[in-house]
Amino acid sequence: MASPNSSDSIVIVGAGIVGLNVALVLAERGYGQSITVIAEHHPGDTSMTYTSPWAGCNFSAISGSDANALKWDRLGYSHLTKLASERPDETFVHRTPSTELWDENVPHDKIKAMSEYLEDFRILPEEELPEQVKFAVSFTTLTINAPNHLQYLYHRLKKYGVQFLRQKIPSILSAFASPTTKVVFNCIGNAAKTLPGVEDAKCYPTRGQVVLVRAPQVQSNVMRHGKDYETYVIPRPGSDGNVILGGYMQKGVGDGATYSYETESIMDRTKRLSSELREMEPQILAVFAGFRPSREGGARIERDELIVAGDKRVIVHNYGAGGTGFQAGYGMAMEAVKTVDDGDIRYPTSDELRDVGDPCLGDPWRPSPTCYSFPAYSPGPPAYLEVSLLSQIRNRNRNHHNTDTTTMLKEKRTNSLAFSQTDCHSCTSAGRACDRRRPQCSTCLGLGVKCGGFVTPLSWDNNRIWLGQPSQKKRHIYDSNRGNESPKASPRAFRFVDASSRRKRRRRVSPVSSPEEEICRASESPEEIGINSYLAHSSDSLLDDFDPLNFDDCELLDTVIPNPQEFMPDWMPTTFPGQESQDQMILTAQPSSNSVGHASEDIFTQSLMELLETVSTHPFENHQLEPPRLVPSPTEQPTSETSTELIPNQIGNQHERLFQMCTWSKEASEHRTKAVELLDNASKSDQITRIGLNVLEPILIMFTLDCTLSATGPWSGHLMRVRSVLDACGGPLALDNSRVRSQVGMLFWWDATLALISRQGIIIDQSYLDHLMLSQGQDEWSFYDLTGCPGDLFVRLVQLSELAKQRELAACMTWLTFDLSPVMKIEREIQQWQSSLFADAYGPNFDTIVENASDSDAEADIEERFHSKQDRYHCAEAWRYALLIYIERVFRWDRKCPRPLILTWLVRKTMDHVRCCRRTSQTQKQLLLPVFLAGSEMTDEEMRGFTRQYCKWWANRSRYNMFNSVSSLLEDIWEEGHSHAWWGSVIDRKTRSSGVGDPGVQFLFG
């Protein structure tokens, strides 16, 4: 490969063993400073989709017998032998005696070729063969500690100057985001089947399951190739006696779960295969499943040429190694690099190349440190990269690109939509020459800055422009009190108004004398209302307690849920099939700056937003909201004739119906179903590129609306949709403003609390939480503001939810032992946790409150500040003790024994802090999950009574049936009545899936 221009850059997509070997071959030839490795997963990660760390791994006859496979194996053996000879401890590559046996289908040609270079090669005589074995050989193989070897390669490449960027690219063409990138090596493994721009139908996963055991007596590698199975024993170098046992070769299987019966089969087969393994009972450390990146016809190493932004670029495909990446990867890398040597001679004509336009790439994102690990290995932390893909690649060559820009401006332009008629906003403001290429100009992309886009001329339909003349059309506004009498002339005409003139929408408390409140009071018995001093008032007097509290000036709500008058994305379809127009109307909202010219497409969204204003969407919002009034406003105008075809006016009372009846009306159910369909469509990858993170807002609202109905629901569906949206938008660094971060914070809260109870792990990647925590100082919100749980404790809650998943897996396996050390570490951190923001307001802190008071502060103001600070203290302490309850019950408790007595003390401490929070404050409402965890352990009837009162009070106050769900669930737990019963078994029984196609439900108490 001839020396590239000093300004050229090389991009390698994929950081598995194949991609790292390509980087190594190039770096050894002097290109280290020009290389950028882009990958979703880096060495040190343990994702199931990151295959390389899960490999056995060794050098064996498992690869193909074709000429390419034989050549790559020989090069790989030579490379690995050199590493084992020169620096075995650093590279984690060791020479190991090996025996391979075949039950049938002996690859004699393959064995003959390998015998020419394998050390100590010998064919075993028939008398040494075990029963049913037809052929066997022995030789000195190379065994590799896969995760640690990947770490070695990573650090070695960093010394060469190779840059690593954590990024899931939306298309292989995105790797050409920089105009200086001339060559891209495609080493994406299993992603080759689905990644746009590659989409190789020949690719498929081959599932394997392995067991990591501690067996220091095993010093030899043994493999047996049978019909439809593989059995192997591979000692892991540098691991102090760990051994990989396997396995399975399940072609086309993408199931990432591990199964106990497969583990039992592996243990049985490997013990019969290896006499060393039988000497001492191995200790099972972990069970893994992974997917070998296989391909019909073998690995693909192929050069492709294409035109990107008018320039010739080269892409070299290198994937499909199956289970031979470690032994053949170096040879495959040399072959892939050679294709650039031999092929980069002439520039093909335009007829020979295909122009793929301009790629675009989202922002990179940072990984999260693993909360815990099995005792298998503890590799160093993954690299944290602070710079974006574009700036990292392009800033090396900024001077060179300025020359290229001048050349590009001389290109012949057409009048197609590929070019704008004017310069982009960014170049215009900076005084730069712009090439006007859509959707983002190459000038801005080359400089690593965000292109501001181009001017879009707008043409308004005369029928939709306010000319100061009243409309001659009359609209029939249905009124349920009048029925279907003939329409009368409307006294007001609708028109668009200036955005600054809209009236402020104030949230008001529903009158206690409303019919809905009468129904609520009628459903409660006097005995239930008057249980203690807190509830010794009538229902209407209790509601009066909250009247003085004014949350109109609280702007935090708008950082999470958009004002319906401001939320107008431009991607909603215009009509609903099958909806009748009679006796219906639409609640319209003013078009925002986001939706000029698209108001008719937003009818459903703004109607949904108006409807959902009746839902308490912020955790600290303490007042009830009226159902939306179906009365036209002088400042509101339907934006098209289709606006009369969507939302029935009866849907306005859905919140109260949800609370009273615990069910949806038929009309609301139909609209909710349609909303889910729209969200599914909007969450598709081709739509997300246009919509972006705006789709989080309706997801958040739908989530909140479902919470009002019950604590049970298919919550994982919402969260999977959120995860796909976030990943498609570019990962954590796409959360570039406080509002979006607060929305993701709320969604992550729901995800974590759901995982805490289900013990099935979080759905949204933890890297998003890391990003949110880093941004806490610059945002106006905190996790306490959103959820009532201090951020430091929330981080521990997330860690515990992930560990609980592993604890449940270990409980189902005979030979797997769960490592309690990370749990004990978290427990100590929780026990020792203190924060000045949540300190006890008594003593010196009270003196500080008094000293900081101004002369204008009334005594009542000072007292309120004291009570607020004390509420924060008790709220934080309730969470702290609740997490300690969780640790004791989920991790420390032996499920064959009665419950630990320490729970009695922890329960009392938790509930004492809950009691101490004022009911006139929203703080106590945020403690539903601690109340559940403590309540499920209660045996004292008086404390159970307080728990019932808590749920009833806040169900009526907040209109969330989630509180009623918890009360009902606690009654079921208490009815179990024996010492071995616990909340986990009851919830598992209630949420168990009924069969195929039924995802089941989960309990959400956050």
Image: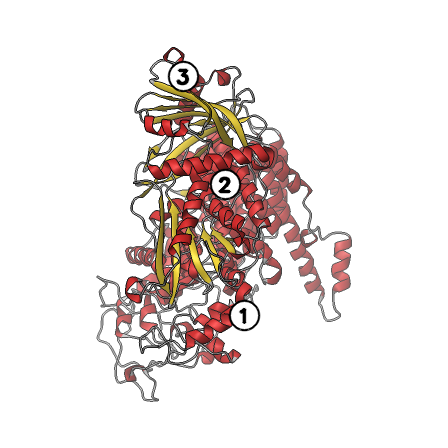
Quarter of the image for residue 613 reads: bottom left
Q: Is residue 241 left or right of residue 500?
A: right
Residue 697: x %, y % from top left? 43, 61
Q: Residue at x 47, y 58 (%)?
A: 616
Cα distance in 3D space between marks 3 and 2: 39 Å
Cα distance in 3D space between marks 1 and 2: 40 Å
Q: Is residue 983 left or right of residue 487?
A: right
Residue 178: x %, y % from top left? 46, 63
Q: Element under label 3?
A: loop
Q: Earlier in the sequence, mark 1 or mark 2?
A: 2
Q: Earlier in the sequence, mark 3 or mark 2?
A: 2
Residue 102: x %, y % from top left? 35, 22
Depth check: give the residue in front, 576 or 394: 394
Q: Earlier in the sequence, mark 3 or mark 1?
A: 3
Residue type beneath disc 3:
Leu
Cα distance in 3D space between marks 3 and 1: 65 Å
Depth check: give the residue in front, 619 or 63: 63
Depth check: give the residue in front, 121 or 411: 121
Which disc, if any, is residue 124? 3
**Residue linked to disc 2:** 46
Residue 611 visible in the snapshot:
no
Quarter of the image for residue 130 reads: top left
Which disc, if any, is residue 399? 1
Crowding at dot 3, Cα within 10 Å, few <14 / some 14-19 / many 20+, comes out as some
